[in-house]
Amino acid sequence: MTSTTDSAPTAAHADLLKLDRQVCFALAVASRTVIGLYRPLLEPMGLTHPQYLVMLALWEQSPLRVADLAERLSLEPATLSPLLKRLEVAGMVVRGRDPKDERALAVSLTERGADARRQAERVPAAIMERLGMGIGELSDLRDTLTRLIEAAAPR
């Protein structure tokens, strides 16, 4: 007896290439849709969603080396650089040499950037309300997505 993973698709699962069966499609639509919910919440703060992610990391720890920030956000430093430039122009962060390693570039929150955290504290509750999902359900979803990310990571 063979398992369904080893054998040809059954009649009920015959077309595995149907769009609505694709994990990649569901993830892409969910990502665009959920990120779109953040837009009206972040605009008054002068932040885009990618900038918000940078700020979340810096609200946890500042200063942070650019390389460490890029790793934390799963971004290439070259992708992160324009985000940091715009945040610096907006007065939210400053970039400078890491005091622990002069060869490395570090990012620090400015007073304005640190103060923006208070305004951002309303964002998670507004997203939960808009989605009609509680923290437990969203935590479970995040944990499932984290496992998916880890499983898909290069080995």
Image (cartoon, rainbow, N blue to C red):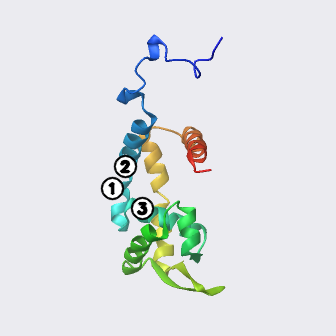
Residue under numbered circle 2: 37
Between 118 and 71, the one lying in front of the other is 71
Q: CA distance from mark 2 to mark 3?
A: 13 Å
Residue at the image point whose x is 37% and y is 41% from the top:
29
Q: Is residue 128 left or right of residue 1?
A: left
Measured in 3D between alpha carbons, the distance from the residue under mark 1 to the one under mark 2, in whole angstroms, is 7 Å
Task: From the top left corner, tell me how far across and down residue 32 is, in percent.
Answer: 36, 47
Q: Do callouts 1 and 2 mark residues in contact (Cβ within 8 Å)?
A: yes
Q: Which SS class for mark 2?
A: helix
Look at label 1 and name its amino acid.
Answer: Pro
User: Residues under labels 3 and 1: Cα distance?
Assistant: 14 Å
Q: Residue at x 41, y 36 (%)?
A: 26
Dot 1 corresponds to which residue?
Answer: 40
Residue 145: quadrant of the picture: top right
Name the side, left or right, on which 140 lies relative to 9: right
63 vs 48: above or below: below
Q: Disc 2 residue type?
A: Leu
Tell me which residue sits at (42%, 32%) in the image.
Answer: 22
Q: Are marks 2 and 3 in contact (CB under 8 Å)?
A: no
Circle 2 Cα neighbour tier, 10 Å, few/some/many (<14 / 14–19 / ≥20)? some
Depth-wise, is mark 3 or mark 1 nearer the camera?
3
